[in-house]
Amino acid sequence: MSIKTTIKRAFALSYHERRPVEKQFIKLGEEVGELAVEIQVQEGDTPVGKGSTDGINGECVDVMLMALAIFVANGGKKKEFISRMEEKMDKWESQMPTEIPESIEFDIDKQLEELS
């Protein structure tokens, strides 16, 4: 599945989310808490049995999906999402001490081409 298809599906699911935004926000908080537990497990601060099978990456995705659902519930559209993402990434990149190595972009370039 391409990144474009995945993003379109995430937006579609977000548009159909039935929970009110307050409940979505509570769910987002739960997901952030679960992510924190996974990080603590990885760092050895919490027993492995306290974690889930999702691990850090799975919980990161859960956080992103709930944040997207809240964005959509607040009237956000794909065009605004892309614009705000670019704005926030520009700011983030400007705070980095060095340029991003090209080797990081090796796998994502092909996927990003599909978004154009």
Image (cartoon, rainbow, N blue to C red):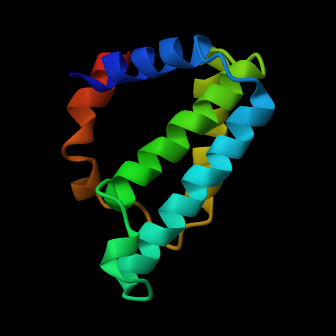
Quarter containing the N terminus: top left
**Nearest the eye: 18 or 110:** 18
| Residue 45 visible in the shown view | yes
In the rendered view, does 31 fall on the left or right side of 50? right
**Nearest the eye: 111 or 90:** 111
Count of labels in the image: 0
User: Residue at point 62% right, 38% down?
Assistant: 67
In the rendered view, does 12 fall on the left or right side of 6? right
**Furthest-bottom residue in this view:** 45
Q: Quadrant of residue 101?
A: bottom left
Indicate whether 35 appears above or below 90: below
**Nearest the eye: 93 or 85:** 85
User: Residue at point 44% right, 88% down?
Assistant: 45
User: Residue at point 58% right, 36% down?
Assistant: 66
Q: Quadrant of residue 15?
A: top right
Indicate whether 71 appears above or below 14: below
In the rendered view, does 76 fall on the left or right side of 16? right
| Residue 83 visible in the shown view | no
Q: Quadrant of residue 71?
A: top right
Residue 80 place in picture, x, y as percent: 67, 21
Residue 40 place in picture, x, y as percent: 45, 79
Residue 11 place in picture, x, y as percent: 52, 17
User: Residue at point 43% right, 52% down?
Assistant: 59
Quarter containing the C terminus: top left
Indicate whether 94 appears above or below 38: above
